[in-house]
Image: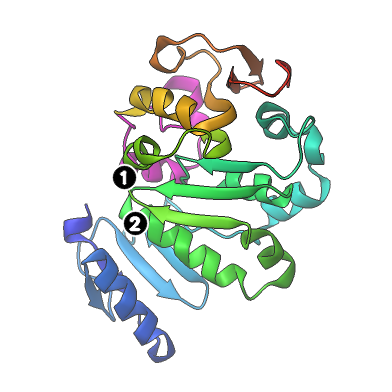
Amino acid sequence: MIDTLTLVCHLPELAEQAQRISEQLGISLSKRIPEKADFILILDDNGLKLSKPYDKSVGDLSIDFADGALTWRRQHGGGTGQAIAKAVGLKQKKQLTILDATAGTATDAFVLAALECEVTMIERHPIVAALLENALERAELIPDVHDITQHMRLVKGSSLDYLTQCAEDAFDIVYLDPMFPHSGKQAAQVKKSMQFFRDMVGKDEDADALLAPALKAAKYRVVVKRPRKSPYLNNQTPTLSQEGKANRFDIYVNKGMKDSG
């Protein structure tokens, strides 16, 4: 899709930023929406977003660490009592270093950073990485959000390559949330904007291959987020699982932490 993608920006004050993004992605830059374009990127006062301009049934997709849902979760979401916090082991240790090897829209990374973890995010899809980079830049303008995002570092590229090159025990925790296909009732519950995000990114075909190097890179544990009824990653039984209504966290304990969440 990126070969035919156009970045649309009509604001002169954003022209330099638009040029930089278009060059980074290797895509064309225009002041107008191309005819019959299935997808476009738009840069405006609200930041960078992915859009289906001729399909009004689908909302634009952008990443905003100051949005209402994340703000509410940060202020009222339960702190270290949240499922993801328990899964990574924040009950036992504070200020963990975490590698989020499948960052996506980085919601989980932001939640963990808000809980005082140092989070390195890996994102290989260039469009998603551009959306993430833009969200981090915009967060710098909002002091209480920037206090959190300064604990988040984005690395663009293959998580498998990154993990393979990691030293042993390079991070306290490695977190994996590979993209998986949704069907039936699950698909109906996913927002349309997220549906086309999943269609764009596709399934992580190399997800099973991530587990072994992740276990080497993690000092304490690897945490894998999965659909509740899906098979284990690489068919490897975890030390324990923590189930929710739709998802579960499979926890592979290495050493130095108790075997409970």
Mark 1 — residue?
Answer: 200
Q: In this rendered view, identify the residue nearer to me: 257 or 38.
A: 257
Is 70 included in the stretch rendered in magenta?
Answer: no
- Expressed as whole percent of the image width and height from the top left, the position of residue 174 reads 53, 34
Mark 2 vs 1, N-terminal side: 2
Is residue 71 left or right of 48 when viewed as pictured? right
- Expressed as whole percent of the image width and height from the top left, the position of residue 218 reads 54, 31
Q: Residue at x 38, y 91 (%)?
A: 12
**Residue 38 in the image: above or below residue 46:** above
Residue 55 visible in image: no
Q: In this rendered view, identify the residue nearer to me: 138 or 124.
A: 124
Give the magenta range: 176-205
Q: Quadrant of the C terminus?
A: top right
Name the residue furthest front. 168
Mark 1 Cα shell of 10 Å, populated few (<14), some (14-19), many (≥20): some
| Image marks 2 and 1: residues in contact by CB distance under 8 Å | yes
Question: Image quarter for residue 219?
Answer: top right
Q: In this rendered view, identify the residue nearer to me: 45 or 137.
A: 137
Is 195 included in the stretch rendered in magenta?
Answer: yes
Q: Residue at x 34, y 65 (%)?
A: 41
Q: In this rendered view, identify the residue nearer to me: 130 or 39.
A: 130
Identified by mark 2, the residue type is Ile
Name the residue furthest left. 3
Name the residue furthest bottom. 12
- Regarding mark 1 in the picture, which secondary structure is present there? helix
- Regarding mark 2 in the picture, which secondary structure is present there? helix
